[in-house]
Amino acid sequence: MTGYALASANRLMHFVENMLVYAFASILNSLNLPLIVVEIPAESRDPANPKRFNLDIRQPSVKKWEISYREGRDFV
């Protein structure tokens, strides 16, 4: 694959992942559940487990995930 194809595939997969997590977080918020979506920092992730997000209990000390654009090669 060319570099352009790899970059495009990664951007598309990040977009889909972000939209799904954003929708899920919006549903949690609209139901007034005490849960929020948090992003696991890249340096704290297990390389054998591609999990990027986690649920946590809503607390002032826990920073909820906010959607943002970033470049990266998490997928391909």
Image (cartoon, rainbow, N blue to C red):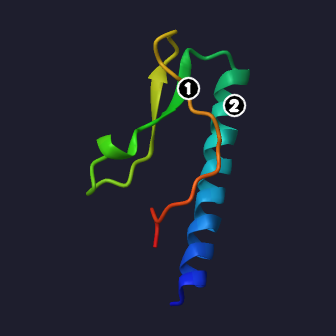
Question: Which residue appears at 52% of the width and 15% of the height?
Answer: 58
Question: Which residue appears at 65% of the width and 58% of the height?
Answer: 16
Vertical comparison of 60 with 76: above or below: above
User: Any mark on residue 42, and which?
Assistant: none
Residue 54, x across and y down, in percent: 44, 35
Instruction: Indicate which label's residue lies in the foreground, 2 or 1.
Output: 1
Residue wearing tag 1: 64
Q: Secondary structure at mark 1?
A: loop
Q: Of all residues shown, which one is farthest toward the bottom?
A: 1
Vertical comparison of 5 with 34: above or below: below
Q: Is residue 2 left or right of residue 46?
A: right
Q: Nearer the viewer, residue 25 or 41?
A: 41
Vertical comparison of 22 with 64: above or below: below
Residue 70, x across and y down, in percent: 58, 53
Q: Nearer the viewer, residue 33 or 41?
A: 41
Q: Of all residues shown, which one is farthest toward the right?
A: 30
Residue 38, x across and y down, in percent: 49, 31
Instruction: Identify which amino acid the numbered label 1 is placed on.
Output: Lys
Disc 2 and disc 1 in contact, CB within 8 angstroms: no
Vertical comparison of 5 with 56: above or below: below
Residue wearing tag 2: 27
Q: Of all residues shown, which one is farthest toward the top?
A: 60
Question: Which residue appears at 30% of the width and 41% of the height?
Answer: 44
Q: Residues within 10 Å of mark 1 (few under 14, many from 20)?
A: some
Residue 28, x across and y down, in percent: 64, 26
Q: Using the numbered discs, state the Cα–Cα distance from disc 2 to disc 1 in whole angstroms.
A: 14 Å
